[in-house]
Amino acid sequence: MAYTLYGKAGFGSVCVEAALELVGAAYEFVELDPLGEAAEQRRLRTINPVGQVPTLILPDDSVMTESAAILIWLGDRYPEAGLAPAIDAPERAEYLRWMLFLSASIYSTFSISDGPERFHPDPATHPTLLDGANQRRADMWVLMNDAFDGAPGPFLLGETMSLLDVYVAMMSRWDPGRADFVDQCPALLPAVEATEADPVVAAVWARNFRTGG
């Protein structure tokens, strides 16, 4: 039985696409743009009422949404892939902490950046909303960077790549871009580069991002 992943190139579905490839799961990718034409948005809302990607249909036809939840579930569902600390592993608490931090404190800022009109109808307020989202994102990246400053590496949790690394690497490609991430997050950058050097991740990135910079 295969999964069905609804997503869009370069969007939040990238990390789930990489996770499915890394665990070796069969899946079909269906492209739907959550910011696209009205008909496409309506189709997505019939699957995920929030109208967001990633949306993952499991082999039993149940629906999973929320990128962090999907990554955590896949890591636990396929322990043989070694992409998530076991429940009793000492790294488990840090893994869960930062997966949820990324989702709540960084990923969430893109909801404003991608559509400030969803938060306030007056266009005159949108520059303030965008400035606030951008500053919040920068502050949260610096906070996470400081927390990992001096960590042994090469990955965020040590010697082994986890889906936490994949999640960070995906978001490092988003606005305001890799150059800003390099400036703000020098302690996170080695783990991102090690993750992107993985051949499976590199192949997914090549389908979704311009990876030259």
Image (cartoon, grey):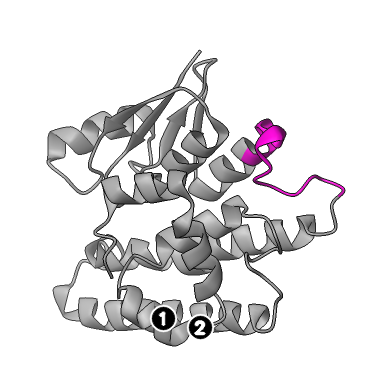
27 on left or right of 151: left
Expressed as whole percent of the image width and height from the top left, the position of residue 57 reads: 46, 25
Mark 1, other Cα within 10 Å: few <14 / some 14–19 / many ≥20 = some
Q: Nearer the viewer, residue 76 or 82?
A: 82
Q: Which residue is mark 1?
A: 182
> Can you say whether 18 is above or below 196 in the image?
above
> Can you say whether 17 is above or below 116 in the image?
above
In the picture, the disc for residue 186 is 2
Spatial CA span between label 1 and label 2: 6 Å
Specify the segment rendered in magenta: 75-88
The verdict on residue 60 being magenta is: no
Expressed as whole percent of the image width and height from the top left, the position of residue 20 reads: 49, 35
Question: On the image, which quarter does residue 128 sit in?
Answer: bottom left
Could you tell me which quadrant the C terminus lies in?
bottom left
> Can you say whether 57 is above or below 50 in the image?
above
Q: Nearer the viewer, residue 147 or 132?
A: 147
Q: Secondary structure at mark 2?
A: loop
